[in-house]
Image (tube, rainbow, N blue to C red):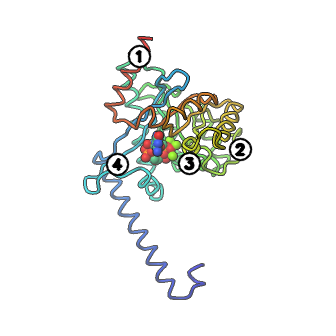
Amino acid sequence: YRAKALGKGRYTLFDQEMYEQTLRLTQLESELHYALEHGEFELYYQPIIALSTNQLSGFEALIRWKNPKRGFISPIEFIPLAEDTGLIVAVGDWVMKEACHQLQDWMRQFPEAAHLKMSINLASHQIREPDLLDKLDSILAQTGIDGSSIRLEITESTLMDQGEQTIKKLSQLRARNIQLSIDDFGQGYSSLSYLHRFPINILKIDRAFVNQMSDGGENIEIVRTITVLAHTLNMSVVAEGVETQQQAEILKQLGCEFGQGYLFSRPLTAADAELAIAKSINLSQVS
Ligand code: C2E
Ligand code: MG
Ligand code: MG
Ligand code: MG
């Protein structure tokens, strides 16, 4: 309607843009298909640390796309496009399988690692998808891992978008003991007053707040408030993007249970994550 108001000539421009956008998406869709079939995706694993003990508590699985022509493509670039094409469901299926099989493998190798949790990002399409529960059931059955070992991360906006249907789906996930996290909390305009309606276990504070915490800064008060709110609702708190020792100290004092960020570790390849597990087991046996 906007193009119309600007006169006839603008129609063409608008159509041209739409056409190019569609073409780009179609091309990307086939590239993503190809990438899935040819193993161009890889999961990295970023440690999540219990702040009170400094022990490894689990990992967040983070997808990487290594495209032979275009090189490394960040999920920040291709995940939104995968969502637009709908191919996020196929990509997300691969992520869930890969992450759970990896966890199963680690649990087999390291019986002492049975407590580790695997966090997996879930796009909003995936929540809406009717087969999600069946898929998860079959992954859990195949790997033999318990629902309580996995955590699904859902962004605040996904949660707020979708109303009653989402609540029902989330409850079905909880019935399998699967844990649920709100990702990037604080980024949306979340209706704090809605939060108690969702069966969420963990709140992940967006790294924007964590990063800007300095002594006496107002972000400390925001993080404190979020932490108190989460605890009131029986949720644990993970701080994202912890980069300095000072931030870790403040977070610990605020009662935030877990931290994730470059201070502890960057996202690791599966091989390096395995070394991190082995190291954390040895450390806990020494102490
Ligand atoms: P996210 O779920 O909030 O993941 C955390 C992001 O913060 C990751 O970026 C991680 O590498 C980065 N990060 C961790 N610690 C620090 C830190 O100390 N400083 C800074 N500056 N950054 C830190 P990454 O891996 O590039 O992923 C970006 C986003 O892409 C994710 O944000 C998530 O929304 C999406 N994503 C990644 N993998 C998947 C996936 O398998 N499925 C879906 N649906 N989305 C994914
Ligand atoms: Mg996440
Ligand atoms: Mg996040
Ligand atoms: Mg994020």
Residue 29 pos. (x, y %):
38, 58
| Residue identified by numbered label 2 | 192
- Residue furthest out toward the top: 286
Q: Amino acid at mark 2?
A: Leu
Closer to the chain start, of discs 1 and 2, is 2
Residue 70 shows in this picture: yes
Mark 1: amino acid:
Leu
Mark 2 vs mark 4, CA separation in Å: 35 Å
The amino acid type of the residue labelled 4 equals Trp
For marks 3 and 2 on the same chain, the one whose residue lies earlier in the sequence:
3
Q: Which residue is mark 4?
A: 65
> Which residue is nearer to you in this view: 59 or 228?
228
* Quadrant occupied by the C terminus: top left
Quick one: label 3 or label 1, which is nearer the N terminus? Answer: 3
Residue occupied by mark 3: 128
Q: Residues within 10 Å of mark 2 (few under 14, many from 20)?
A: few
Q: Residue furthest left?
A: 68
CB under 8 Å between callouts 4 and 1?
no
Q: Mark 4 or mark 2, which is nearer the start of the sequence?
A: 4
Viewer-nearest of labels 3 and 2?
A: 2
Q: CA distance from mark 3 to mark 2?
A: 23 Å
- Asked whether mark 4 lies closer than 8 Å to ligand 1, one says no
Which disc number belongs to residue 283? 1
Q: Residue at x 34, y 58 (%)?
A: 30
| Farthest bottom residue in view | 8
Residue type pointed to by label 3: Arg
Between 114 and 277, which is closer to the camera in this rendering?
277
Report if the CB atoms under discs 3 and 1 are less than 8 Å apart. Answer: no
Q: Where residue 271 appears, x then y in whole percent?
A: 31, 31
Q: Estimate the spatial distance between the alpha carbons at disc 1 and disc 2, rounded to whole Å.
A: 40 Å
Is residue 92 visible in the rendered structure shown here? Answer: no
